[in-house]
Image (cartoon, coloured by chain):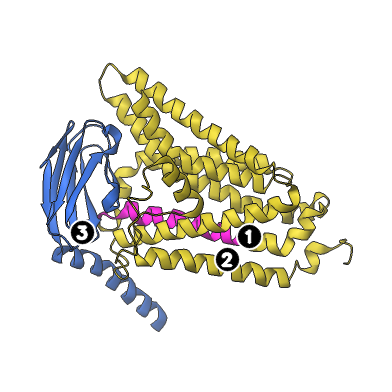
């Protein structure tokens, strides 16, 4: 039972952290809970579909369908995270002043929510499929421990939910003025870490064959397998043995994120979205 | 028209590249039956990329995982998958079926 708990918990850590961060980042946006829940539910439904299409996914792209699929999901999440931060940089002031509470601006204010809902869905989908397959494997095996394994698996999911809550309540203790900055930075590192993972997947599929040399090996200092290592892996993209391409993707994403948000800040929200905002 | 041709040619080139390269790469077979890997000790050449053809004979899905080699791939029930592995330093690496990692273990020896 403990074994099942550990396996499932390890899979849900990433989604758990991401959901907590997204909830905190969208705390003051009306309807954000609904969007995030929608993302989670869509992710779970998608997990089941992916899990039971695994045979055809695995067979696609010359046997490297899983890698291509993972890279596509990660790439989508990275784009959504970058876009969210850039959008917030351009509209942040209007958001903070609750100017999206009225009129057609509500619709405009929903766009970053939709992006983050996709990120949440992608996070749940990627690891969720493994949980579904694991629990399915337990169910079809005929050991006497099936009930216990299931209980362990469910406990792992519940722990993942607790981790979401812990992340959320930890973050919302930060004063609202700083919360925006903190979640923005967290999202930038999340995106960089995901870009690095996507790069690794493309290398494993043999689609990218350059820059495969190991950049460093810090396994003996901090194993990616340890709880700390895994949390850092999700939060800042820690990898114990990244390839050079992974480092390039990581740094490139951070630079792109920084450059684009700076640009957005110096070109704040268009007239359309700042209508009615007091001039400053 | 020309653009379409170029795109089509590009797509064909990409598709044909993947299997072509796979042929040149050293390939090793690995089978999982129940909780037993065959061979339990897989000897590979160090410092060269290689491919593992992993055959999961079980009725349940398996996930071949060797964190130190960045291997982490699901094999559906009763199926064979290919896993590309980046060049490994000489040494011994543990792999498991993550879904039954306490009992289904093996080692890769790169030399």
Q: Chain of mark 3?
A: B
Q: Which numbered disc flags the more N-terminal residue, 2 or 1?
A: 1
Q: Which residues are magenta?
A: A63-84
Q: Residue A279's x, y, as percent?
A: 89, 66
Residue under label 3? B89
Q: Residues within 10 Å of mark 1 (few under 14, many from 20)?
A: many
Quadrant in which the N terminus of chain B is drawn: bottom left
Disc sitting over residue A85 in the figure: 1
- Tell me what hue chain A is rendered in: yellow
- Tell me what hue chain B is rendered in: blue
Quadrant in which the C terminus of chain B is drawn: bottom left
User: Are the two marked residues, 3 and 1, in contact with CB atoms closer than 8 angstroms?
Assistant: no
The kind of secondary structure element at disc 1 is: helix
Of the residues tagged 3 and 1, which is closer to the observer? 3
Query: Are both tags, 3 and 1, on one chain?
Result: no
Q: Give the CA separation, mark 2 to mark 1.
A: 8 Å
Query: In this view of the protein, which residue sits in the foreground, A224 or A53?
Result: A224
Q: Give the CA separation, mark 3 to mark 2.
A: 35 Å
Query: In this view of the protein, which residue sits in the foreground, A228 or A197?
Result: A228
Above or below, A10 against A208 in this view is above
Left or right placement of residue A8 versus residue A142 in this view: right
| Residue B68 visible in this rendered orientation of the protein | yes
Of the residues tagged 3 and 2, which is closer to the observer? 3
User: Are the two marked residues, 3 and 2, in contact with CB atoms closer than 8 angstroms?
Assistant: no
| Residue B1 visible in this rendered orientation of the protein | no
Above or below, A251 against A152 in this view is below
At x 52%, y 57%, the residue is A191
Q: Residue furthest top?
A: A144
Residue under label 2? A257
At x 50%, y 54%, the residue is A236
Q: Residue A209's x, y, as percent?
A: 29, 68
């Amino acid at each position: 039972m403990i074994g099942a708990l550990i396996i499932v918990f390890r899979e849900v850590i990433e989604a758990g952290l991401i959901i907590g961060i997204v909830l905190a980042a969208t705390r003051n946006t009306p309807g954000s809970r609904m969007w995030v829940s929608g993302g989670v539910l869509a992710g779970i439904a998608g997990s089941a579909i992916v899990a039971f299409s695994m045979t055809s996914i695995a067979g696609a792209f010359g046997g490297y369908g899983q890698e291509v699929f993972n890279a596509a999901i990660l790439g989508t999440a990275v784009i959504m995270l970058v876009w969210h931060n850039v959008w917030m940089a351009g509209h942040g002031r209007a958001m903070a002043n609750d100017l999206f509470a009225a009129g057609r601006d509500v619709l405009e204010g929903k766009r970053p929510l939709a992006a983050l809902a996709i990120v949440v869905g992608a996070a749940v989908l990627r690891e969720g499929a493994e949980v579904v397959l694991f629990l399915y494997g337990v169910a079809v095996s005929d050991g006497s421990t099936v009930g216990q394994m299931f209980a362990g698996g469910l406990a792992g999911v519940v722990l993942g939910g607790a981790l979401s809550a812990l992340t959320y309540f930890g973050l919302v203790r930060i004063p609202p003025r700083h919360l925006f900055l903190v979640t923005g930075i967290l999202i930038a590192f999340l995106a960089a870490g995901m870009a690095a993972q996507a790069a690794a997947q493309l290398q494993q599929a043999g689609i990218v064959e350059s820059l495969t040399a190991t950049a460093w090996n810090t396994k003996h200092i901090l194993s990616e397998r340890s709880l700390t290592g895994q949390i850092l892996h999700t939060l800042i993209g820690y990898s114990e043995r990244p390839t050079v391409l992974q480092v390039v993707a990581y740094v490139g994403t951070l630079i792109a994120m920084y450059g684009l948000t700076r640009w957005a800040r110096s070109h704040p929200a268009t007239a359309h979205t700042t209508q009615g905002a007091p001039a400053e | 028209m020309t653009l379409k041709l170029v795109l089509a040619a590009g797509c064909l080139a990409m598709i044909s590249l993947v299997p072509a390269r796979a042929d040149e790469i050293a390939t090793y077979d690995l089978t999982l039956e129940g909780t037993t890997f065959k061979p339990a000790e897989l000897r590979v050449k160090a410092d060269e990329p290689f491919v593992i053809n992993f055959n999961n004979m079980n009725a349940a899905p398996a996930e071949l995982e060797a964190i130190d080699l960045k291997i982490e791939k699901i094999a559906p029930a009763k199926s064979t998958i290919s896993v590309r592995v980046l060049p490994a330093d000489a040494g011994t690496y543990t792999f498991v079926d993550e879904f039954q990692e306490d009992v289904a273990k093996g080692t890769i020896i790169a030399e």
